[in-house]
Amino acid sequence: MKESNSIENLNGQAAIDKIKELVKHGRTCLMMTDLDNRPFTVRPMAPQKVTDAGELLFFSDRRSNKNLDIEASSDMHITFSNDGDNEYMSLFGTARTYRDQQEIDELYNSFANTWFEGKDDPNLTIIRFSPSEGHYWDSKHGKAVQMVGILIGAITGKQTDDGREGDLKP
């Protein structure tokens, strides 16, 4: 049986560009910490920014379990899912926590007020996730076009080639 996805492994800047694209389309991710223990500790998070180096920045409370997990082990796994356009990404890497008021001032938005008492909240920290490797899956034309292709394939018996996937090495 023919594989419908085409493989496109991405390295360096091409991988960083793909990470930026998929993070922009799927704003919420699942952040997994404490990877040495099963089940992993998993929580939904929203990155505040993807840097030019492909690092993801998150806000976090210095007292949170995720900060404690990162202090114990910097290994982290993050997954993104954008079901609307059939885009998915899994990233492995390391994280660190810190407080930098200048970065906080740059990134802070009113949405963060849900968890913090303003940008000067002393408990507000940044998690900087540096991906070392990952994998992505996406469709070339989005879900609607892909569904039409599947329908045509079911009627005609011809396979469609709308998907891409590949390894990411920023």
Image (spheres, grey):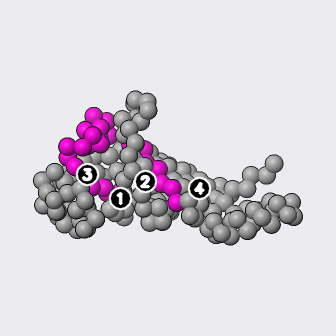
The reply to whether callout 2 and callout 3 are in contact (CB within 8 Å) is no
- For marks 2 and 3, the one nearer the N-term is 2
Question: Percent from the top left, x then y, of residue 25?
Answer: 48, 65
Residue carrying label 2: 29
- Horizontally, is 97 left or right of 101 in the view? right
- Horizontally, is 126 left or right of 137 in the view? left
- The three-letter amino acid code for the residue at tag 4 is Trp
The reply to whether callout 2 and callout 1 are in contact (CB within 8 Å) is yes
The Cα atoms of the two marked residues, 2 and 4, are separated by 15 Å
- The residue at the point 85 percent across, 63 percent down is 155
Residue carrying label 4: 137
Residue carrying label 1: 47
- The residue at the point 65 percent across, 69 percent down is 144
Residue carrying label 3: 60
- The three-letter amino acid code for the residue at tag 1 is Pro
The Cα atoms of the two marked residues, 4 and 1, are separated by 20 Å
- As helix, strand or loop, the secondary structure at mark 1 comes to loop
Q: Which of 28 and 139 is in front in this view?
A: 28
- The residue at the point 42 percent across, 49 percent down is 30
Q: What stretch is highlighted in magenta?
A: 55-82
Question: Percent from the top left, x then y, of residue 128?
Answer: 30, 52
The Cα atoms of the two marked residues, 1 and 3, are separated by 10 Å
